[in-house]
Amino acid sequence: MKNKRIIIAGGTGFIGQGLVEYFGEDNDIVILTRRPLPASGRVQYMTWDGRTRGDWAVALEGADLLINLTGKSVNCRYNDANRQAIFNSRTDATLILGEVVQTLEKPPRLWVNAASATIYRHAEDRPMDEFTGEIANDFSVQVCKRWEAAFNGITLPYTRKAILRIGVTLGWQPGGVMHPYLNLVKFGLGGHQGSGRQMFTWVHINDVCRMINWLYDNDNASGVYNCTSPHPVPNHTFMRLLRKTAGHLFGLPAPAPLLSIGAALIGTETELLLKSRWVLPTRALQEGFVFQYPVLETAFPDILAHMPRSAYHLF
């Protein structure tokens, strides 16, 4: 994709940084954010609150691609206030973007709305995909269902719509999960979490970007796609391969009771580590998408090559 105009709502987070790095050299990008930064190269920032129409709306006129990543982080305690903010930040942003796009004379050709692979139930028995996946009703699933329902309720006759159910995204950019995982490895705590049998559904940040590019180039692509590696692994395998790539022979495991205490101390939930996400990208594979990093054995070396040695070694 070159010489296109791309709008990224909520684009200052981890995935947004990856998209800017991937698309920013050859395309004009406008980031909608609560905390705008100075323009840099072909990347501009506009203020929005994720709820109401503002000056940012003019940027969508004539845009080629709209990507919505907006949503409060789920890395928090699930008290009533945080639950409501997690729901509202996703649905409000989606709805106001829909209202604006409906008024445009030249709307974006494609709107990709982020979602999460955690919409599927805890699964240790079989993998889930777009066709046979079972959707449960715990809190994280409710978030995903409302988010997708808000998007699916918007009628846009001139804009293709796609939902990306994204797995745990691995990359070197700040704010991603690799930094805390590598800290565990660095200090000798990089063993498995809980039983270690829970499945870890992941995707390399470059493949997230490449799948969005692929969706744009394929005029018939719309609807739900799982944006996940075709080779998820058990947690114990994930940690073993990470230790091996980082050059560490041993890591202490973290049993579930210890994780519960630690999660309470740092203000998060153990579900983020212990839920078994076993998700496959069946639609994308059937329709011809080829992953650049299908396995951790190639993903981990690439990611660590972008990071200083101090990120995963004390010395």
Image (cartoon, rainbow, N blue to C red):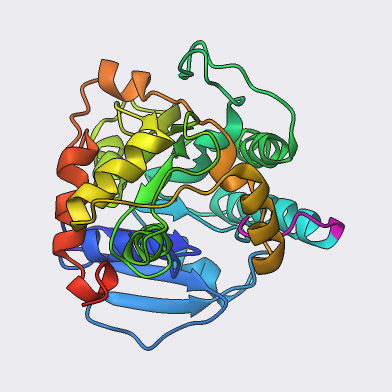
Across and down, in percent, residue 168 comes to 43, 45
Q: Is residue 61 visible?
A: no
Q: Nearer the viewer, residue 131 or 310?
A: 310
The answer to if 251 sits in the magenta stretch is no
Residue at 24%, 65% (x, y): give it.
21
Residue at 58%, 35% (x, y): give it.
275
For residue 147, what is the image quadrant? Answer: top right
Q: Nearer the viewer, residue 118 or 31?
A: 118
Residue at 40%, 57% (x, y): give it.
181
Q: Is residue 20 left or right of residue 306?
A: right
Task: Tell me if residue 131 comes above or below residue 179 in the rendering.
Answer: above
Across and down, in percent, residue 254 comes to 52, 49
Task: Tell me if residue 16 comes above or below residue 49 in the rendering.
Answer: above
Outermost residue toward the right? 80
Q: Which residues are magenta?
A: 74-80
Across and down, in percent, residue 69 comes to 50, 55
Q: Is residue 4 visible?
A: yes
Across and down, in percent, residue 6 comes to 34, 59
Task: Tell me if residue 150 comes above or below residue 263 in the rendering.
Answer: above
- Quadrant location of the C terminus? bottom left
Q: Nearer the viewer, residue 116 or 214?
A: 116
Residue at 74%, 55% (x, y): give it.
88
Q: Nearer the viewer, residue 11 or 14?
A: 14
Outermost residue toward the bottom? 38
Secondary structure mostly seen in the magenta stretch = loop
